[in-house]
């Protein structure tokens, strides 16, 4: 029987920031989705952001980490796990591999911006465990710039979040 992959909560008193990117080739743009949840799975804040640049899949995944880090700080969170579904980006952030040249400046910028006052850990999750962030990234196609939701859940995410919470 195949193992089901789902969202796992962060340790108590910490947050988890899940991010994902989506490429919209025909429109020559990309989307980024960010979801911040606490250790009980409660939604703290979400973001759908359009990136008006023709990024490739790996580039938008790195951009999603960058945007997630910035959004968490804007919300006032400094102790969190930043989780995405790109193993290449994760390995580069953890220093397990050299980042590909196309994303190296973004990776280095992310690492440089993780200041001494922050407690940020990086985590990898398979795509199936990152569905709400993926949905937020795809939702960005319909945004002029970006949309945020604070302490509420966008209606198009409700079922995906229920599935995640039931998984815990």
Image (cartoon, grey):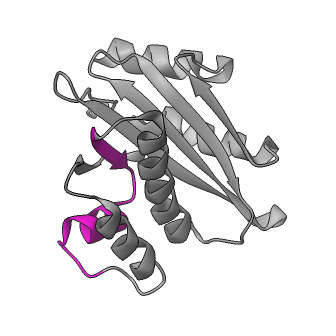
Residue at the outermost front position = 117
* Residue 4 vs residue 58, the one in the foreground: 58
- Quadrant where the image shows the N terminus: top left
Q: Position of residue 58 (x, y in %)?
A: 49, 69
Region rendered in magenta: 79-98
Question: Which residue is at 57% across, 16% downward?
Answer: 152
Q: In the image, is 162 to the left or to the right of 2?
A: right
Question: Which residue is at 39% across, 71% downward?
Answer: 109
Q: In the image, is 25 to the left or to the right of 138?
A: right
Q: Quadrant of residue 103?
A: bottom left
Q: How many marks?
A: 0
Please determine whether, in this image, residue 58 is positioned above or below residue 147.
below
Residue 64 in sight from this viewpoint = yes
Q: Position of residue 3 (x, y in %)?
A: 26, 33
- Quadrant where the image shows the C terminus: top left
Q: Position of residue 148 (x, y in %)?
A: 63, 33
Q: In the image, is 160 to the left or to the right of 168?
A: right
Question: Which residue is at 41% across, 50% downward?
Answer: 69
Q: In the image, is 103 to the left or to the right of 114?
A: right
Q: Position of residue 78 (x, y in %)?
A: 30, 40
Question: Which residue is at 53% across, 70% downward?
Answer: 59
Please determine whether, in this image, residue 7 is positioned above or below residue 80.
above
Residue 4 among magenta residues? no
* Residue 151 vs residue 92, the one in the foreground: 151
Residue 82 among magenta residues? yes
Please determine whether, in this image, residue 84 is positioned above or below residue 16.
below
């Amino acid at each position: 029987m195949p193992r089901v992959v789902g969202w796992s909560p962060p340790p108590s008193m910490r947050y988890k920031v899940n991010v994902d990117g989506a490429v919209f080739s025909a429109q020559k743009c990309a989307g980024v989705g960010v979801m911040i949840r606490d250790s009980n799975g409660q939604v703290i804040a979400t973001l759908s952001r359009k990136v008006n640049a023709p990024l490739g899949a790996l580039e938008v995944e790195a951009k999603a980490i960058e945007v997630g880090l910035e959004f968490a700080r804007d919300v006032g969170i400094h102790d969190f796990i930043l989780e995405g579904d790109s193993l290449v980006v994760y390995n580069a952030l953890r220093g397990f591999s050299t980042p590909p040249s196309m994303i190296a400046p973004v990776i280095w910028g992310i690492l440089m911006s993780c200041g001494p006052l922050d407690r940020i850990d990086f985590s990898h999750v398979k795509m199936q465990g990152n569905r709400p962030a993926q949905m937020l990234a795809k939702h960005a196609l319909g945004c002029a710039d970006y949309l945020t939701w604070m302490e509420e859940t966008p209606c198009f995410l409700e079922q995906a979040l229920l599935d995640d919470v039931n998984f815990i």
